[in-house]
Amino acid sequence: MKQLKINPQVYDDLVMIKEHISEDSPEEAQKVIRKILHDMDRLRDFPESGAKLSNKVGFDVKYRYIMTYSYVTIYFVENDFVNVTTVVHGAKDFSVLKF
């Protein structure tokens, strides 16, 4: 089992996601955030389960991603760690993210 390292930016991402969804449904916002966190936690046991981000952005990067509802958790595996770097909406153009 790998250790999970979460970039502080991820917490800001989750707050923004929760606030956005809460405008329509606070209950749905809780559900989405819980599922994103659950899926992140599963990366400890299955770090290679995410798709390679290189296939989506068109250039070589070390990152992988998993989808939870409409949201994408971006991470990379290094030694004994799964490093979660950001969570964004799936409609975002990933090629503009800074890698």
Image: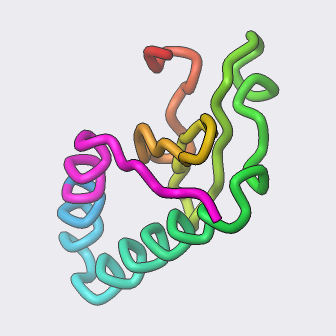
Give the camera-side residue of 87 and 79. Answer: 79
Residue 60, given in percent of the width and then of the height, sits at 75, 13
**The residue positioned farthest toward the bottom in the image shown:** 27
Question: Residue 21's x, y, as percent?
Answer: 29, 68
Q: Quadrant of residue 44?
A: bottom right
Per the rendered image, the range of residues in magenta is 1-15
- Quick one: which residue is furthest to the top in this view? 59
Residue that appears at 77% across and 35% down: 52
Say which quarter of the image contains residue 20. Answer: bottom left
Say left or right for 91 vs 12: right
- Compared to residue 96, the image places residue 26 above or below, namely below
Where in the figure is residue 30, as x and y percent of width and height? 30, 82
User: Is residue 8 covered in magenta?
Assistant: yes
Is residue 80 placed above or below 96 in the rendered structure? below
Q: Residue at x 56, y 26 (%)?
A: 94
Q: Nearer the viewer, residue 9 or 47?
A: 47
Left or right of 26, for residue 67:
right
x, y (%) of residue 10?
31, 47
Q: Is residue 91 magenta?
A: no
Tell me what residue is drawn at x 52 percent, y 63 percent.
40
Quarter of the image for the N terminus: give it. bottom right
Q: Which residue is nearer to you in this view: 82 or 22?
A: 82
Q: Note whether 94 is above or below 18 in the view shown.
A: above
Position above or below: 56 against 1: above
